[in-house]
């Protein structure tokens, strides 16, 4: 590798540590660093400069009620209770069911939507299964990728895990299906470095299925690829 | 094996994590009491709303509770690991709120001024000196370098988004990030010397 190429990686390392590389670029850098001792050393050298950043934030007192809710949920789960977790009043987010609960009601989704068929895309793709409960929480799991939707009112929060990093120029886009109609949920997002991602979906009323596809940056009017995951919403 | 809270308080973070992995709520409580404050502060700094910051922290700590055994000593301190989780969740929140600009307040003192004085505890007051020292490293940076670092780390913007936003070439953004981190690294090394 010549020096110019190496300089390019060196500049990318700072952006990578700050979480500012596009997902495809981050994956490329990780592959390079895995085989380049010099860049690995540079990455480790600069890492403390990023780790100190959260410590520079001005301290704000955390509400006592937050501690109370958190410990209530933790003690409830430690005791094996199935009670719903405590949430902040008016919270837009709500925590989902534990996996053990969600998996109890797995069901394969076989959805074909007006010529736009959901299909297994191979080992990296996802046939989709879902679970539901009497609460407004829905959980889904598929090979390789896990998905969970938690609803409050008409707002749903989609949480994904075990996602692969996307190629450069690609984003994830969420879609909702009502009857046979599929429309964009107006949610574009990318996986975090740990393979998780979250998207807010407004207008869950009447939604049968929530899907996620990989689309060009900026999103698409209609899905242009098979879903990487879909979650059926029990009616 | 569950341990009494008083014993848990004497354990180092790295020793608490296996206990949390074994679903010991007392160990988790000690862990939260140690780090909940900085976690909430970071979440609030990123999302800019108290309610949303609470949600972010609750979700992050519950994920730690459920996956505490996954902590890997080789990847840094427990505190850094935890703060990384909080930061990711907070950035997730910003990204999921498509169409809403993230909080980009470059003057943290302005945030502080809006807080009731009673919110500052004695313990926090003591920690502020250390915090200000750390902030010094960031504050000493040229504005163009601290700006790209803040936009990336606290705003969750990619380098290309920052380049568009600031109307500068991509290479300039990356270069400023590297120079900024180099200087912070240098300050840290100097402080430790």
Image (cartoon, coloured by chain):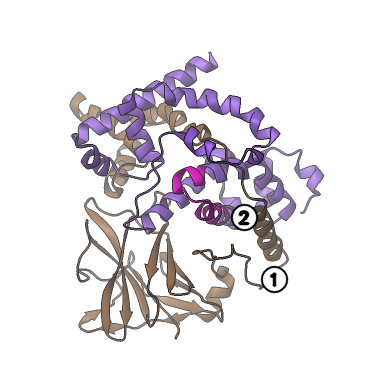
Chain colours: A brown, B purple
Q: Could one spot residue B71 in this view of the protein?
A: yes
The quarter of the image holding the N terminus of chain A is top left
Residue at image location 49% in from the left, 15% down from the top: B190
Chain of the residue that carries numbered disc 1 in the rendered image: A
Residue A71, quarter of the rendered image? bottom right
In reply to whether residue B47 is colored magenta, the answer given is yes
Residue in the picture at 23% in, 50% down: A168
Q: Quadrant of the C terminus of chain A?
A: bottom left
Q: Nearer the viewer, residue A185 or A77?
A: A185
Image spot of residue A184 (x, y percent): 27, 70
* Nearer to us in this view, A193 or B136: B136
- In percent of the image, x 22 and y 84: which residue is there? A114
Q: Position of residue A42 (x, y in %)?
A: 37, 27
Tell me, for residue B65, which label it has, or none: 2
| SS under mark 2 | helix
Near mark 1 (Cα within 10 A), the count class, few <14, some 14-19 or many ≥20, is few
The residue that appears at 20% across and 71% down in the rendered structure is A222
Q: Which mark is residue A81?
A: 1
Residue A21 in percent (x, y) is at 30, 42
Range of magenta residues: B42-57
- Nearer to the camera, B141 or A82: B141
Does residue A45 appear left or right of residue B6 in this picture? Answer: left
Query: Along the horizontal axis of the image, is A124 left or right of B55?
Result: left
């Amino acid at each position: 590798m010549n020096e110019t190429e190496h300089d390019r990686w060196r500049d990318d390392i700072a952006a990578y540590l700050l979480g500012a590389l596009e997902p495809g670029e981050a994956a490329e850098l990780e592959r390079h660093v895995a085989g380049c001792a010099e860049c690995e050393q540079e990455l480790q050298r600069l890492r403390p400069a990023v780790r100190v950043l959260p410590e520079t934030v001005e301290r704000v007192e955390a509400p006592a009620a937050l501690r109370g809710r958190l410990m209530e949920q933790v003690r409830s789960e430690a005791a094996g209770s199935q009670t719903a977790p405590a949430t902040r009043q008016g919270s837009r987010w709500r925590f989902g069911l534990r996996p053990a609960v969600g998996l109890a009601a797995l069901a394969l989704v076989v959805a074909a939507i007006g010529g736009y068929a959901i299909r297994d895309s191979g080992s990296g793709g996802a046939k989709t299964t879902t679970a539901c409960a009497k609460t407004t929480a829905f959980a889904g799991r598929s090979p390789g990728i896990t998905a969970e939707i938690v609803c409050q009112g008409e707002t749903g929060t989609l949480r994904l895990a075990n996602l692969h990093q996307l190629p450069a120029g690609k984003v994830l886009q969420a879609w909702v299906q009502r009857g046979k109609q599929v429309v964009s949920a107006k949610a574009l997002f990318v996986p975090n470095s740990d393979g998780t991602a979250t998207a807010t979906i407004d207008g869950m009323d009447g939604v049968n299925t929530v899907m996620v596809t990989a689309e060009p940056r900026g999103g698409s009017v209609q899905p242009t690829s098979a879903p990487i995951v879909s979650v059926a919403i029990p009616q | 094996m569950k341990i009494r809270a008083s014993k848990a308080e004497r354990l180092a973070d790295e020793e608490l994590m296996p206990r949390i992995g074994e679903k010991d709520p007392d160990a988790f409580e000690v862990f939260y009491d140690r780090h909940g404050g900085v976690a909430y502060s970071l979440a609030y700094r990123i999302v800019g709303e108290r309610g949303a910051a609470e949600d972010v922290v609750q979700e992050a700590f519950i994920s730690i509770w459920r996956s505490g055994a996954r902590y890997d000593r080789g990847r840094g301190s427990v505190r850094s690991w935890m703060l990384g989780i909080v930061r990711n969740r907070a950035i997730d929140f910003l990204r999921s709120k498509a169409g809403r600009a993230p909080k980009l307040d470059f003057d943290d003192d302005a945030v502080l001024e809006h807080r009731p004085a009673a919110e500052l505890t004695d313990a926090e007051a003591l920690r502020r000196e250390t915090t200000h020292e750390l902030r010094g490293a960031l504050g000493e940076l040229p504005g163009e370098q601290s700006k790209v670092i803040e936009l990336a780390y606290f705003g969750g913007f990619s380098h290309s988004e920052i380049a568009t936003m600031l109307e500068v070439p991509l290479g300039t953004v990356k270069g400023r990030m590297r120079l900024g981190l180099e200087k912070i690294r240098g300050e840290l090394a100097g402080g430790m010397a």
